[in-house]
Amino acid sequence: MSGVTDAPFRRLAASLGAGLVVSEMTASEALAEGRAEALLRTEGRGLDTHVVQLAGCEARWMGEAARIVEASGAAIIDINMGCPARHVAGVQSAPR
């Protein structure tokens, strides 16, 4: 849930017993470009299992973003393949 499941929320949910928490959907291109907002969305400090959800439609950005989150400790990478949000389904770039 973009804008809702930020790192503090995920840590709180995990501390209250959630079995698994997942990052906000993160645009792979924005993450690969090092945009601060994208990096914050993938924050996993303090979680037993770090899970990141990536979105995108270009293999080069998806691959680079996956390498970035893996290097930051992600145990699971969720590839978003069905979000109805216009900016995702309409293959638009992440806002700059």
Image: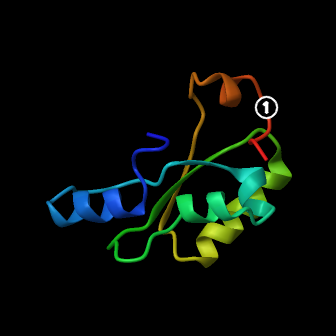
- Would you place residue 19 above or below residue 43 in this image? above
At which x and y percent is residue 6?
A: 43, 55
- Would you place residue 19 above or below residue 27 in this image? below
Residue drawn at (64%, 58%) of the image: 38
- The tally of labels here is 1
Q: In the displayed structure, does residue 21 sit left or right of residue 69? A: left
Residue drawn at (56%, 28%) of the image: 83
Quarter the N terminus occupies: top left
Which secondary structure, mark 1? loop
At which x and y percent is residue 73?
A: 52, 76
Q: What amino acid type should be assigned to the residue bearing mark 1? A: Gln
At which x and y percent is residue 76?
A: 48, 61
Q: Nearer the viewer, residue 94 or 29?
A: 94
**Residue 84 visible in image:** yes
Q: Nearer the viewer, residue 85 or 66?
A: 85
Outermost residue, left direction?
A: 16
